[in-house]
Amino acid sequence: MNFLKQFFLRRRIYSDLAGEMQEHLEERADELQANGMSREEAMATARREFGNVTVLEERGREIWQWAFIEGVFRDLRLACRQLRRNPGFTLTVVLTLALAIGANTAVFSIVNALLIRPLPFPQPERLAGLTRHLTRTLADGGSMEKSDDGQDGETWELVRDHVSAAQAAAFSFDSNGVNMEAGNQARYIHQHRVSAGFFDVMGFRPWLGRTFTPEEDHPGGPNAVILSYELWQSVFAGERDIIGRTIHLKGALWPVVGVMPAHAQDSVPADVWTPIRPWRNGEGGGDNYQIVMRLRDDATWEQVNTQLKPLQPAILNRAPKGETEQLIATPLQQDLAEQKRKPALILMTAVGSILLIAAANLAGLMLVRVSNRRGEIATRLALGAPRAAILRQLFMEPFLLSLAGAVCGLALAILCRTSFVGVFPPNMLPLGGIQIDGRVVFFTFYAWPPPVR
């Protein structure tokens, strides 16, 4: 409280300090005048003996705690005036930084969602994807390893029937574009095929109705469709009697059995879900399915992998010559990150290089600007200005420009987020969408270009 009181009363304190120095000058001048000097000569001699009054006042102010804060605000005001005098230079620097930082912020928001942010599912640490690790023996005696998430119908049946430590579900790799007719409306939508129990594994309950039954997920079973919350609101105006009504998908009738909540996320963009009906023939004869598992409350992932080991002989019999396969339950966060890590980091590196190029060019502009102020700096040094104060003032202009560029870049990333998403293929988009959260904001302001600081 004493610090704040002194800070707001500092003008009075400065006035008292100047008055006290003036009293010392007057007293010394009186002494010299008493020794026979004229008043003008006595005052000039007293000033020479006392020194530069302005410099002494500045040094006297530095002993108080608020002096540094006040100096910073004074330098900020001066920097603002300097930048206002050169609007062309200021706008060039701010716009260049805004574009470069905005692009980096937008791309980092995708990297954050893909590789850092937790998955938007209840208890995501209990989710895992089933991965096939293939090892190929090379002619020189070495080996090459790769991972694949694709599973066939036989693997799905083996996992479903013999792995009791986790609840499993199958789904197709991507969503399909289909034409939907409902009432008098027609729309092109995304359909994703999933097995019965898929939403239980992902941890979502339907907003209305129910999920698929095993009978509906069996080859030749009855048709059934689940709507996304967004489609239910946009096409059916949120009508609660939607359950039991039929829609046309690819010309066939599909009864609506449920509506998922707004926060329900899928591995791919989806407007409707239909049963995948996995089996061993046809589509099931190839690696066209993916399998996701949720660990049961009383089980561990070690138990899941132990139960997968007896299934290996059947898989090994199907492996090409010179290759061996192994089924492993990989945490879903790690599984999805490994699929998208390389393209995401390549994109981050590309836009990062743009930021470095912009920073290097702006650093050159700042050096030219500082060199043009050599006369001003020399004059201030000659008048007794401390070097630290001059360096601090020179730092303020790049600081304000970088701050303005970061703020404008963040605003640009937020405003262009929707259009920026349209550039990416659906399989590169993160689950839960792209969000500008606290981590992204921290990155934006932490990643100010060093050459401009």
Image (cartoon, rainbow, N blue to C red):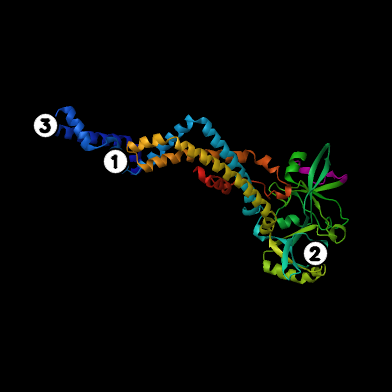
Q: CA distance from mark 2 to mark 1?
A: 82 Å
Q: Which residue is mark 3?
A: 34
Marks 3 and 1, Cα distance to the nearest angstrom? 30 Å
Q: Which residue is mark 2?
A: 155
Helix, strand or loop at disc 2?
A: helix
353 left or right, relative to 146: left
Is residue 249 shown in magenta? yes
Residue 178, quarter of the rendered image? top right
- Give residue 443's mark: none
Q: Nearer the viewer, residue 211 or 382?
A: 382
Magenta span of residues: 238-252
| Mark whose residue sits in front, 3 or 1 | 3
User: Residue flagged by tag 2: what amino acid is it?
Assistant: Thr
Relative horizontal placement of residue 253, taking residue 5 as reference (left or right): right
Task: Please name the residue shown 51% across and 30% down the image.
Answer: 87
Characterize the local packing of mark 1: few (<14), some (14-19) or many (20 or more) Cα atoms within 10 angstroms.
some
* Label whose residue precedes the other's in the sequence (2 or 1): 1
Single out the mark in the foreground, 3 or 2. 3
* Residue 433 x/y as whole percent: 67, 47
Residue 295 in sight: no
Give 288 or 147, whichever is nearer the viewer.
147
Which residue occupies the foreground of this view, 158 or 136? 136
Q: Nearer the viewer, residue 283 or 212?
A: 283
Q: Amino acid at mark 3?
A: Ala
Between circles 2 and 1, the one closer to the viewer is 1
Give neighbour class at mark 2: few <14, some 14-19, many 20+ (Cα, 10 Å). Answer: many
Label number found at residue 60 = 1
Where's residue 119, x and y in %? 65, 54
